[in-house]
């Protein structure tokens, strides 16, 4: 089964549309949370995803707009953008976000926004921290988002060693004997120095992953953010990819 894996769309419709067009044919779509927050088009992003039979889970920004977590935990710009997103949401979008589970297992893959240990909040940036998470899921592969940085953590077959690596763009990698946690990066707000929208494709039969990027109309999203009065830093970071 060919699965398109996306995360952290963050209300950036231009980026989401570019990914959906660039991905080619896929049999399933998995979205790893943070569909809303930061960007200017939360309802449009949810409606676009809902045109596909897709699986999705909750992220911290999704819970933020629902009031399920206090916004004191967000930085000032993220909080302002989250409150603006909250005001825009229609009933269908609210229902969609309310229905999101924290973590799921599908096609022998675990899905969690932050980490399998703390699905909503934990950031998996370093291998030393990612290693602890392997005790909190059963499958060979776990998919996470949240950091907006594409990365692969590989646990050795004996469980003793965990290494982090960047997947080269456009070069499919078939997973080996160990266990893995993979992050597709962010569709709507990449933070690895590359402003193009990031996503991954998995072939679940062979457990092959491919990291992909696609340019989108950053200026169109920035113009909508300016019009909405969203925080300036969140607007400028889109063209930098940080
Ligand atoms: Zn995010």
Image (cartoon, rainbow, N blue to C red):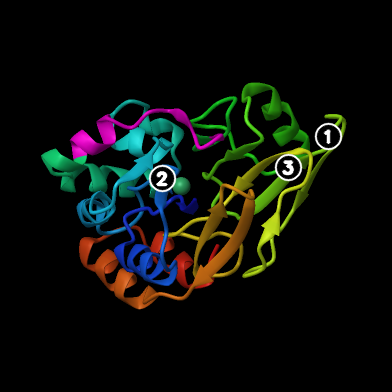
Answer few, some or many: residues within 10 Å of disc 1's Cα (few below 14, many 20 plus, some between 14 and 19).
Answer: few
Q: Nearer the viewer, residue 65 or 50?
A: 50
Q: Left or right? Give the position of 67 relative to 5.
A: left
Residue at position x 18%, y 44% in the image? 89
Which is closer to the viewer, label 2 or label 3?
A: 3
The relative height of residue 73 versus residue 22 in the rendered view (above or below) is above
Residue at position x 23%, y 42% in the image? 86
Q: Nearer the viewer, residue 234 or 16?
A: 16
Looking at the image, is mark 2 or mark 3 earlier in the sequence? 2
Does residue 174 show up magenta in the picture? no
Query: What residue sits right under mark 1 in the picture?
Result: 157
Q: Is mark 2 within 8 Å of ligand 1?
A: no
The relative height of residue 191 versus residue 240 in the rendered view (above or below) is above
Which is closer to the viewer, label 1 or label 2?
A: 1
* Percent x, y of residue 223: 28, 73
Image quarter of the C terminus? bottom right
Answer few, some or many: residues within 10 Å of disc 2's Cα (few below 14, many 20 plus, some between 14 and 19).
Answer: few
Query: What residue sits right under mark 2 in the picture?
Result: 76
Q: Which residues are magenta?
A: 94-109
Measure the alpha-carbon separation of dots 2 and 3. Answer: 25 Å
The relative height of residue 90 versus residue 235 in the rendered view (above or below) is above
Residue at position x 27%, y 36% in the image? 97
Q: Left or right? Give the position of 52 relative to 138.
A: left
Query: What residue sits right under mark 3 in the picture?
Result: 126
Q: Secondary structure at mark 1?
A: loop
Q: Secondary structure at mark 2?
A: helix
The relative height of residue 71 versus residue 77 in the rendered view (above or below) is above
Measure the alpha-carbon separation of dots 1 and 2. Answer: 43 Å
């Amino acid at each position: 089964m060919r699965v398109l894996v996306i995360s952290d769309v963050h209300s950036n419709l231009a980026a989401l549309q570019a990914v959906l067009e660039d991905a080619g044919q896929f049999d399933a779509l998995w979205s790893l949370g943070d569909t809303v927050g930061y960007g200017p088009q939360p309802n449009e992003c949810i409606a676009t995803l809902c045109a596909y039979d897709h699986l999705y889970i909750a992220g911290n920004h999704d819970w933020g707009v629902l009031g399920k977590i206090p916004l004191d935990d967000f930085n000032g710009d993220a909080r302002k953008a989250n409150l603006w997103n909250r005001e825009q949401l229609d009933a269908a979008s609210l229902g969609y976000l309310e229905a999101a589970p924290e973590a799921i297992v599908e096609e022998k893959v675990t899905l969690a926004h932050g980490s399998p240990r703390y699905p909503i909040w934990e950031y998996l940036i370093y291998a030393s921290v990612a290693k602890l998470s392997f005790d909190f899921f059963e499958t060979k592969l776990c998919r996470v988002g949240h950091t907006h940085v594409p990365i692969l953590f590989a646990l050795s077959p004996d469980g003793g060693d965990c290494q982090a690596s960047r997947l080269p763009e456009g070069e499919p990698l078939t997973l080996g004997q160990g266990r893995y946690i993979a992050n597709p990066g962010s569709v709507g707000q990449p933070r690895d120095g590359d402003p193009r929208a990031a996503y991954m494709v998995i072939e679940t039969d062979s457990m092959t992953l491919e990291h992909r990027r696609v340019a989108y109309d950053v200026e169109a999203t920035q113009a909508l953010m300016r019009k909405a009065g969203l925080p300036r830093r969140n607007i400028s970071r889109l063209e930098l990819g940080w």
